[in-house]
Image (cartoon, rainbow, N blue to C red):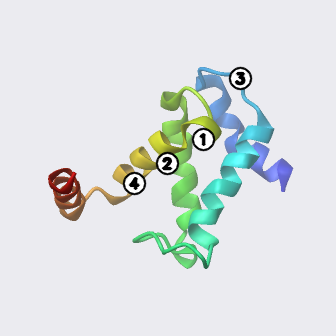
Amino acid sequence: MREYLNLEFRDVAPVLPFDYNLERIIDDFVLLAVFVGNDFLPNLPDLHIHENALERLFEVYKNVLPSLGETLQNMSTTFLTVLHRRLFEREWYDQYEALAAHNG
């Protein structure tokens, strides 16, 4: 599994503003997998394991990670906000933000 994860994510290493660390990538992988395969968390809309949810998360992760400046261990809130917007940009998201801002 470690070898697979290294092969999957190693191509991001040249564009990272920090040193590539497989151990941190594995930690991030576990965090991402929890969102898709955890029966104790509510399902994220449109992220179903049988509909390639992990692959979608990995692609977003690889695209967003260089802009975060570090792995998810320290930036989880920022990443989750960006992830949510990149995966679920729809009208209802704007409505949700407006409602949340209104309710403060």
Q: Position of residue 47 (x, y in %)?
A: 47, 69
Residue 11, position in %: x, y? 66, 35
Query: What residue appears at the point 51 percent right and 58 percent down from the top-left corner?
Result: 56
The residue drawn where x is 64% and y is 62% is 33
Cα gap from disc 4 to disc 1, whole angstroms? 14 Å
Q: Amino acid at mark 2?
A: Val
The answer to whether 95 appears left or right of 89 in the picture is left
| Labels 3 and 1: the sequence-earlier one | 3
Residue type at tag 4: His
Q: CA distance from mark 4 to mark 2?
A: 10 Å
- Circle 4 residue: 84
The quarter of the picture where residue 44 lies is bottom left
Q: Which mark is residue 19?
A: 3
| Disc 1, SS | helix
Mark 1 vs 2, N-terminal side: 2
For residue 45, side relative to residue 11 (left or right): left
Tell me the distance, in whole angstroms, between the alpha carbons under discs 2 and 3.
Answer: 19 Å
The residue nearer to you, when weighing 30 against 20, is 30
* Front label number (4 vs 2): 4
Quadrant hosting residue 55: bottom right
Q: Position of residue 48 (x, y in %)?
A: 51, 75
Residue 72, disc: 1
Residue 80 or residue 51, whichever sits in front = 80
